[in-house]
Image (spheres, rainbow, N blue to C red):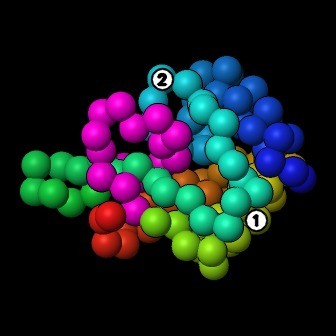
Amino acid sequence: MNSEEMNEKIAALDGLGGKNIPYLGWFWRTVDFDAQTCYLGVCENEDGDPYYIGFMENNKWGYDVILCDEEAFTDLKQKITTALKTDNEEDFIIVQQTMQNMKEEKQ
């Protein structure tokens, strides 16, 4: 599945009223899934601990970001592709858990 197809499917899922693939913002913005790495946005609680991590192609809120390196992004893209192909809730939960566990050092 190429980047364009992934973005179309994710945007269509979002239109059904949920964020199956975590992102920050009011609507899905196109992600370059052909890239080797990406940055993810990090929302933090009052103690500075990350509580929500998601794609964030427009950081107008000034949130911190983490680098999803090549190995991690390749793994994440595979999990997203699987979830989009199967449309299985358990596969989307795996994607969500994977992203929420990416608590690397903030950039």
Compared across the picture, whether 76 is left or right of 45 comes to: right
Compared across the picture, whether 58 is left or right of 73 comes to: left
Q: At 18% from the left edge and 49% from the top edge, which residue is drawn? A: 45
- x, y percent for residue 107: 32, 64
Q: At 46% from the left edge and 54% from the top edge, which residue is drawn? A: 40
Which of the 4 quarters of the picture holds residue 78?
A: bottom right
Of residues 92 and 103, the one nearer the viewer is 103
Is 82 placed above or below 8 here?
below
Q: Is residue 72 magenta?
A: no
Is 103 placed above or below 38 here?
below
The residue that mark 2 highlights is: 26
Marks 2 and 1: in contact by CB < 8 Å? Answer: no
Q: At 31% from the left edge and 72% from the top edge, which residue is drawn? A: 105
Residue stretch in magenta:
52-66
Q: Is residue 56 magenta?
A: yes
Residue 56 visible? The answer is yes
The residue that mark 1 highlights is: 78
Which of the 4 quarters of the picture holds residue 13?
A: top right
Residue 23 visible? The answer is no
Give the amino acid type for the residue marked by disc 2 in the picture: Trp
Q: At 10% from the left edge and 56% from the top edge, which residue is drawn? A: 47
First of labels 1, 2 by sequence position: 2
Give the amino acid type for the residue marked by disc 1 in the picture: Gln
